[in-house]
Amino acid sequence: MSPATQAVLHFLQTWWVELVSGVVIVAVVPLIAGYVVLVERKLMADMQARLGPMRVGPHGLLQPIADAVKLLIKEDIVPQDADSFIFWFAPVISMVAALTSMGALYFGPDFRVAQDINIGILFVIGVSSLGFLGIILGGWASNSHYSIIGAIRSTAQLVSYETAGGLAIICALLLSGTLRIHAIVDAQSDHHVWFIFLAPVAFFTYLVASIAETNRAPFDLPEAESELVAGYMTEYSGFRWALYFLGEYANMIVVASVATTLFLGGWLRPFPNVHWLNWLDLLPALFIALVGIYCIYRAGKQPVKIQVWFMWAVAFACFAVALIFLVPWIFASLKFAILGLNGAFWFLLKVSAYIYVFMWLRFTLPRYRFDQLMHLGWYILIPLAIVNVFSVGVALLLEAEFGWNRWLALIVTTAFTLAIALFLVRSHDKRVAAASSASAATSDSYAG
Amino acid sequence: MADTVDQDATHSNDTLLGADELILNMGPQHPSTHGVLRVKLKLDGERVRGAECVIGYLHRGVEKIAENRTYQQFAPYVDRMDYVAAISNGLGYCEAVEKLLNVEAPIRAKVIRTILTELQRIASHLVWLGTHALDIGALTPLFYCFREREEILKIFEKYCGARLTTHAFRIGGLQYEAYDDFEKDVERFCKDFERRIQEYVDLLTGNSIWIGRTRNVGVLNAADCIALGATGPILRAAGVKWDLRKAQPYAAYDRYQFEIPTGTNGDTYDRYMVRMEEMRQSRLICLQAIENIPEGPIFGKVGKVIKPAPGEIYHSIEAPKGILGYYVVSDGTVQPYRVRIRPPSFINLQALDKMIRGHLVADVVAVIGTLDIVLGEVDR
């Protein structure tokens, strides 16, 4: 064997897990993102008294694939005055950042995506933030007014909300005392409680900040459809556009996973340490089986034969998965797998719930205006996040140094934080009222 | 206003970076210019320093067409001006020609006209509400609004076979008798609509983002409204209680009790509240009207050939978007010598520059939405 071949083999031997998981991420995440889009469209349709995609496949289930094919075969347009290299490169940055940050995530106790990094959370946050570079560059390279305004908005939004989001994450890190993702979830298991209950204000701050970071409504100003056409994506079409889109949805999955890991107990089931609730471990199998039964119930109501078959197929798939979940219960030697399988189930359930909240807000709320967004970020969210970090720190000190009960300490400090929040909101309202009365006095309203 | 201009000038000179103004071309193909309106925005960052409307992309020469058609032939054309409130257009034109002929439609025709026109007002306001909310970023009200509008369009369809450009009325009265279940359909819609309107209120009225986006945005006070000729909900939101249905009753409006809602600040939120209340009032008018539709003929004493005596007439009605006026000149032939139309959208659109100066880009779409323009009517 030549040295070169040996080197390659050695490389493969050392890194094969990472390489395989990289390939899996690149292959699977677009599909997942496509189906997240479909779920979003279906949910939106449900809330808006209509049906949503129904044509491609049963209940539109093949719609993401049709969309992907359509985007791939579309003409690839680069505007004449665009900076063509940056124009080409920007969406790639966006998507690569989103996909790379997934590498450090854990979806279950024994189910890491690629690599257990000792600064896991920092890596995820840092790399996913790089995605904004793609947005800014894309907006700049398009050489279009709408794009550049979208990119500028996006920059300002990143600076404002990443700060608040980061401060919210610090609260959870204070409680867990580590940056390693697995250890954070273990800490929640040791504390016998999810961190959302210990630091509710931090969770709320992170929720708001993560919506803003992923450019979702009501903070979707960089791509505000009704104002900026499509913001930084205005000049993009076809596959490049799809890359941005993919990056956005992958990012959504990332922030939801981070929130789940930090605040919602990761892969822990509800009440992880209460032994008389151990029957909850059967819930995943039961839940999936129920979905299967519902499919059979709906099968009778399908108008077309192929849809009936499809429903039966889905039902049997559900039963098969439920059976897999049940197997470790039947064979004692496989008992160790329960935690892993159920962990993945709970994790995905929590991530889905978090994304559902995103979607729900999007369909319900109007969009903030740019100055309102900045005010919310700088006058309310960031001060609140700073105060909250301080409060959590004080609570931990009270517990460690003065022997207070942890719950008492946290309730007292959270009450303090909420009082500050109330004060911030009040003073903000006053400022807005003052600004608007000033605008009524002069004809140049909203001056300054 | 001179004050503002001076401030602007000093502002741009004092900027250390010497940033130029950005000219942003909005439209004619833009998701929220409500058709083919083109607005040239002068921006300082995101702040609007001036706006210039470019119109005419949908010009069809409706007024000129009138001179080459008989009076009856021209009636369907007016439906194509404000195509989301075609029935109101038709009512104005038919009444103008009736006034020129010095005939009056029978009372039964008038009452049915009133019901249909009020339903059309609700439908027009629903389109406004849905698109306005969509512009401000609320996706869902649009579909709720169109769901209710669909019910109204179904009533139109049952009545005259057309849904959008209905040509429902004829000069002298009605061509079609109300269909058998007309009252029932209208009543069912009105009964249901009270609950529906509460859904929009729940989604928007108390929503702090909505209030933040609409309060003190696009303020147009009463004096400015009158100076610019703005009418309809825009004028009423500024606190002027001027509604032609009360001031110069036409059709059968003098038979019914209703309120004229007014606002105080003349901002986008007030206009929203005024239009919402107008929908409720229209609903009440419909309910009153269907209680007792008088029996009798539906067509007045108008011949097959309409040949008014030489003369001229101006007749205006309160269309959903404002005062819609028809100035018809007859030279004694079967064709009008001149038809001049006062379209509310066109005249309200003049206020755009005044309303958005100093606001942000995002407010431009809010203000265009709150003006409730239809480009078919602006350009004619």
Image (tube, coloured by chain):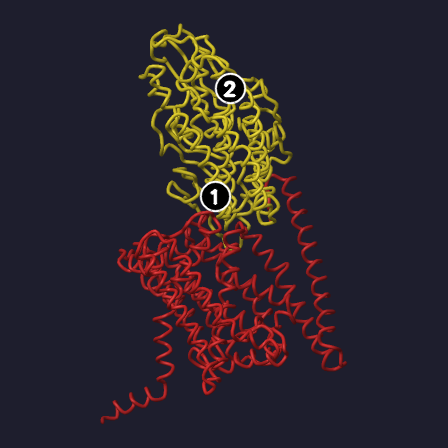
Chain colours: A red, B yellow
Q: Secondary structure at mark 2?
A: helix
Q: Quadrant of the N terminus of chain A?
A: bottom left
Q: Give the numbered dot on residue B111.
A: 2
- Residues packed near mark 1 inside 10 Å, few (<14), some (14 to 19) or many (20 plus): many
To which quarter of the image does residue A296 belong?
A: bottom left
Q: Position of residue A249 (x, y in %)?
A: 43, 63
The reply to the same-chain question for discs 1 and 2 is yes
Residue B210, compared with residue B273, is above or below; it is: below
Is residue A381 found left or right of B316 in the rendered image? right
Q: Position of residue B197 (x, y in %)?
A: 56, 39
To which quarter of the image does residue A390 belong?
A: bottom right
- Residues packed near mark 2 inside 10 Å, few (<14), some (14 to 19) or many (20 plus): many
Callout 2 amino acid: Val
Along the line of sight, the residue nearer the viewer: A266 or B78: A266
Q: Which residue is mark 1?
A: B142
Q: Position of residue B348 (x, y in %)?
A: 50, 31
Between label 1 and label 2, give the one nearer the viewer. Answer: 2
Chain letter of disc 1 in the image: B
